[in-house]
Image (cartoon, rainbow, N blue to C red):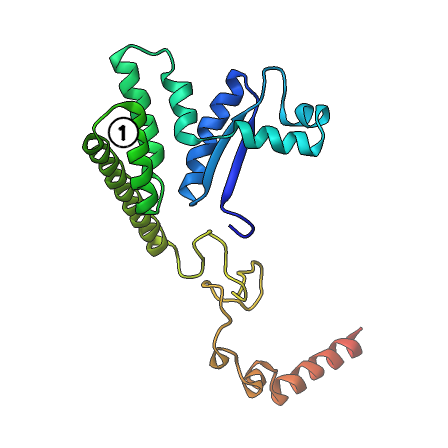
Amino acid sequence: HRFTANIVLLYDGDEAGIKAALRGTDMLLKEGMNVKVLLLPDGDDPDSFAKKHNAEEFRKYIFEHQTDFIEFKTKVLLEGVEDPVKRSEAISSIIKSVSVIGDPIIRATYIQACASRLGIQEQILIAKMNDNIREYRSEQRKEEERKRRNSSAMPQNFNSTGQQPTGAKQVRGGNDSIGDDGNMPPPDAFLPPEAFSKLQPSETQTAETERRSDAATSTT
């Protein structure tokens, strides 16, 4: 969208290229892009074709052979297909592509084009498209609900990716002065200096120890 909303997809003309083109159209339509498709001649990929032609010839070929996605999918999926079930599946695929377009006016324009090209009543295609849109919205709501549940179930010390947020205190092992919850203990948890005096030997105990030491020395 930064430079243009118009995209021409260039693919090899073989089966793999056709499948890739079918996958790529829906992703771009969903992003609001105006998508056209061009299948290169058999045996050529974009790189080999560009090497065989200069820039002007390449641009001219693209201009003359690009098709909108409806015409592309109609040709690929319906050309020569007579079986009613297969035709129905192909038409459903085309309408599914139209359904992902966000702009309702563009959707309506494509539906009119589909009805004209496919020979099907517009109201039938609209009903199918609306079913697809309701299904998409239902899936989106379910996905948002799953994300919301996962977010609420995540511990507060961790973000939605399962990582501790920037600035969070890390839990350390060993004898570090860190609480079980990973936080520093409050200031009043530490003993004041005078408390250690209780742990020092008294003067009487010190004198008695020195006396016994002197006595032992004189005996030896």
Closest to the observer, 126 or 185: 126
Closest to the observer, 201 or 184: 184
Is residue 135 positioned above or below 77 on the image?
Answer: below
Residue drawn 40% across the image and 41% down it: 30
Is residue 144 positioned above or below 79 on the image?
Answer: below
Q: Position of residue 169 (x, y in %)?
A: 53, 65
Quarter occupied by residue 26: top left
Q: Quick one: quadrant of the C terminus? A: bottom right
Quarter occupied by residue 132: top left
Residue drawn 68% across the image and 28% down it: 50
Residue drawn 69% across the image and 34% down it: 55
Q: SS at mark 1?
A: helix
Left or right of 92 on screen, residue 219? right
Residue type at tag 1: Ala
| Count of all numbered marks drawn on residues in the image | 1
Q: Position of residue 47 (x, y in %)?
A: 67, 27
Quarter occupied by residue 107: top left
Is residue 199 positioned above or below 108 on the image?
Answer: below
Which residue corresponds to mark 1? 115
Closest to the observer, 103 or 208: 103
Left or right of 167 on screen, residue 110? left
Left or right of 217 on screen, residue 65? left
Q: Position of residue 183 (x, y in %)?
A: 49, 68
Residue drawn 26% across the image and 14% down it: 85
Pointer 1 local density, CA inside 10 Å: few below 14, some 14–19, many at least 20: some
